[in-house]
Amino acid sequence: MGGVAIVTGGTRGIGEAIATALNDAGHKVAANYGGNDEAAKAFTERTGIPNYKFDVSDFDACQKGVRQIEHDLGPITILVNNAGITRDGTLHKMDYEKWNQVIQTNLSSCFNMSRAVIEGMRERKFGRIISIGSINGQAGQYGQVNYAAAKSGIHGFTKALAKEGAAQGITVNAIAPGYIATDMVLAVPEKVLQKIVATIPVGRLGEASEIARGVLFLASGDASFITGSTIDINGGQHMY
Ligand code: CAA
């Protein structure tokens, strides 16, 4: 093993589990984050994984951030587009700001980060790009037109880029998590969350480590013939 991985939103929640799993598997890992300095500091103290603060919704910041990581750790072999936010609300109450923030942070970030690593991956004829979609991008969700549109966009982005990367040794895949026990999901109002959990056949929220194991697999040599695919990890909540 021993590549260099970037995990966006990698200091908390699902991103933290992914960064830690890749690190444990022998990769050099850079954990990007956007705002929570305290959590990032604690994460690095806990794991020894360096953190890099830049805004993934900002194209130029991603170029600069990726160049810095390459300078520090070496050429990027794995990109995990994990960073994401929610600004939930029904459409009739949603302002443009809430729409735009989620589209920029959750979807445009995949363009910004992939664009910053793709030329190096093409030159080296190897790369793994793994993006975190969502069950809510596949099935829709009450109060989430912004989030569902962005996550659904990730699945289209993945398939298109997979076709471009296939002949260049670059695989491009997505994982669609269901409801995972992270701060994001636990922020859903209790009575709503109870209704949601009742629709999960496995009968519980998922664990961040259960998503990380999927990423680890897609990043590994075992997944060399898998590209353009989405792995659903959702406790059976959505099947199609
Ligand atoms: N499933 C079932 N019922 C739902 C629901 C859902 N997902 N979302 C809302 N409802 C219900 C509520 O329980 C409520 O029903 P009752 O009137 O019978 O009590 C009704 O719809 C109206 O909801 P609210 O009273 O909450 O309406 P509001 O305008 O105050 O709030 C809202 C709207 C902000 C969208 C709020 O309902 C909410 O936060 N819903 C959760 C949205 C959600 O699932 N977000 C996922 C975040 S985690 C994530 O996105 C990670 C991932 O990838 C899976």
Image (cartoon, grey):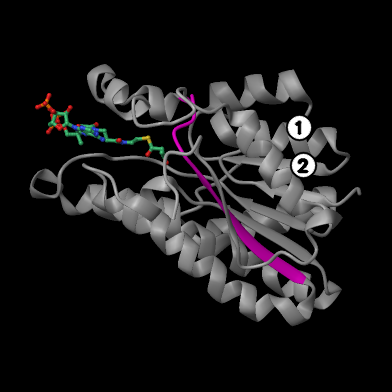
| Residue that appears at 59% across and 30% down | 208
Q: Which residues are magenta?
A: 170-182
Does the residue at mark 1 contact the one at mark 2 (Cβ under 8 Å)?
Answer: yes
Q: Residue at x 45, y 44 (%)?
A: 84
CA gap between label 1 and label 2 equals 6 Å
Relative to 138, 89 lies left or right: left
State the image coordinates of residue 200 (x, y, percent, origin top left): 41, 31
Instruction: Give the tally of numbered discs.
Output: 2
**Residue nearest the observer in this picture, 218 or 161:** 218
Residue 145 in picture, x, y percent from top left: 25, 52
Residue lying at the far left of the rendered structure: 92
Expressed as whole percent of the image width and height from the top left, the position of residue 233 reads 55, 41
Dot 2, how many residues are within 10 Å of its Cα: few (below 14), some (14-19), or many (20+)?
A: many
User: Is 26 a magenta residue?
Assistant: no
**Which quarter is ligand 1 in?**
top left
Amino acid at dot 1: Ile
Is 57 left, or right, of 120 in this rendering? left
Q: Which residue is mark 1?
A: 49
